[in-house]
């Protein structure tokens, strides 16, 4: 009898381990599908207020309201794409491997002009900048842009998959809830339902708040770039505003990008009277936009949407960045919001949890 129990335990343990290994491999293989589903959930959360408006105010049925909502979102996507992709393709062509030497010559020319300009103020930059340029590999720009364009080559499959999944998530808003409740214990289904409804409301507010944040930055950056006469001002402003989605790291990349593009688009002009002043003006405008975003837009979004203090969000984002890099920073707030709602619903009696989730 004991031997039978031992054999049964060994077989059971083996099956559990085999099942976990199979599940892990399935997750690895299904990463694209997981990505499509995640994007679809975000799209459905963004489109949720539009669909609710059409259903509740216009009295439209769920099918037509879903179609119109998706049509509006896809239209916005194509407008953004029509602004960004042609400029990226042009930049990729200009920064191809055949053009790297020419780019280096232009940068060196710019440095010489800067050195001549600052030499009138007894400031010598040539030695420091020359040493930086010698250790700088300009070909990384080509690798980055070529990789990005390769990613865009798969965008057709991504667009179709995300649109297809988003349609059903928008049309039947309880679809995910039914899937979750199927695998939930019977005694916990009410709490699961309450948690799901709170999560949907909070995340929908959060993602729409992000759209508002991006729109404000886009308008501000566009005005700054147009005032200083920078080429492709609207497109550059849109790219930098979208980069702001990545907390803390995105603005740094955006600041470098807006400065670099302003410099390289005006290399033929006089450095003292035009390029330098224009670049400094754009950079100062970018910094003002970031100050507005950090002290006005973000606190409003976080306090009104996910019910969390800005300092609390800052700590969570930094921690997520240390654990999972830029991707962790990007998904930190949504995941933290989900965790807070679940803790509030299932462990709300614990004092620490009650204090942490008192605003939810």
Image: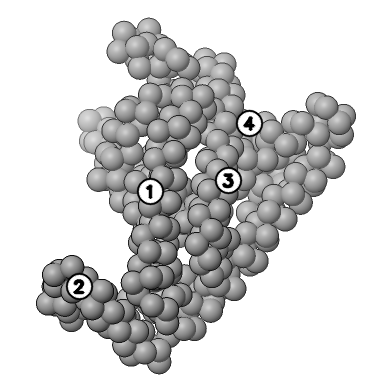
Q: Nearer the viewer, residue 29 or 22?
A: 29
Residue 38 x/y as whole percent: 53, 47
User: Observer-nearest residue: 294 or 192?
Assistant: 294
Per the model, the C-alpha gap separating discs 3 and 1 is 17 Å
Marks 3/4: CA distance?
A: 35 Å
Residue marked by disc 2: 120
Observer-side mark, 3 or 4, equals 3
Residue 186 in percent (x, y) is at: 55, 19
Residue positioned most to the front: 120
Mark 2 closeness class: few <14, some 14–19, many ≥20 residues within 10 Å: few
Mark 3 burial class by Cα count in 10 Å: few <14, some 14-19, many 20+: some
Q: How far, Cα to Cα, is label 2 from label 3?
A: 42 Å
Q: Is residue 356 above or below residue 55?
A: above
Name the residue: 40% across, 92% down: 98
* Tag shown at residue 287: 1
User: Residue 66 in the image: x percent, y percent?
Assistant: 77, 42
Closer to the camera, 70 or 196?
Answer: 70
Nearer to us in this view, 79 or 53: 79
Which residue position is annotated with label 4? 178
Mark 2 vs mark 3, foreground winner is 2
Disc 4 from disc 1: Cα separation: 46 Å
Residue identifier under label 3? 215
In the image, which is nearer the foreground, mark 4 or mark 1?
1
Mark nearer the viewer, 2 or 4: 2
Question: Sequence-wise, which precedes: disc 3 or disc 1?
Answer: 3
């Amino acid at each position: 009898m004991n031997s039978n129990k031992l054999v049964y335990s060994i077989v059971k343990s083996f099956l559990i381990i085999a099942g976990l290994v199979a599940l892990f491999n399935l997750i690895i293989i299904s990463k694209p599908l997981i990505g499509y589903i995640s994007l679809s959930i975000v799209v459905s959360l963004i489109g949720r207020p539009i669909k609710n408006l059409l259903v509740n105010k216009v009295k439209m049925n769920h099918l037509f309201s879903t179609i119109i909502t998706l049509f509006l979102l896809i239209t916005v996507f194509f407008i953004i794409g029509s602004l960004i992709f042609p400029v990226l393709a042009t930049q990729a062509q200009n920064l191809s491997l055949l053009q790297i030497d020419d780019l280096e010559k232009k940068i060196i020319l710019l440095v010489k002009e800067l050195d001549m300009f600052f030499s009138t103020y007894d400031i010598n930059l040539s030695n420091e900048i020359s040493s930086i340029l010698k250790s700088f590999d300009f070909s990384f720009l080509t690798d980055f842009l070529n990789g990005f364009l390769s990613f865009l080559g798969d965008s057709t499959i991504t667009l179709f998959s995300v649109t297809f999944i988003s349609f059903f998530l928008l049309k039947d808003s309880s679809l995910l809830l039914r899937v979750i409740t199927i695998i939930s214990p019977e005694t916990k289904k009410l709490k699961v339902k309450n948690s799901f409804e709170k999560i949907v409301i909070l995340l929908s507010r959060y993602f729409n708040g992000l759209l508002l944040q991006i729109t404000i930055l886009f308008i501000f950056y566009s005005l700054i770039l147009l005032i200083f006469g920078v080429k492709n001002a609207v497109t550059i402003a849109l790219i930098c505003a979208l980069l702001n989605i990545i907390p803390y790291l995105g603005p740094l990349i955006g600041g470098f990008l807006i400065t670099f593009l302003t410099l390289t688009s005006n290399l033929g002009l006089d450095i003292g009277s035009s390029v330098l002043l224009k670049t400094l003006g754009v950079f100062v405008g970018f910094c003002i936009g970031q100050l507005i975003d950090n002290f006005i837009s973000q606190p409003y979004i976080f306090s009104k949407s996910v019910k969390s203090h800005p300092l609390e969000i800052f700590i969570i984002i930094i921690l997520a960045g240390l654990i999972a890099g830029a991707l962790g920073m990007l998904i930190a707030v949504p995941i933290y919001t989900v965790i807070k709602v679940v803790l509030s619903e299932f462990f709300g009696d614990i004092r620490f949890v009650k204090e942490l989730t008192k605003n939810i």
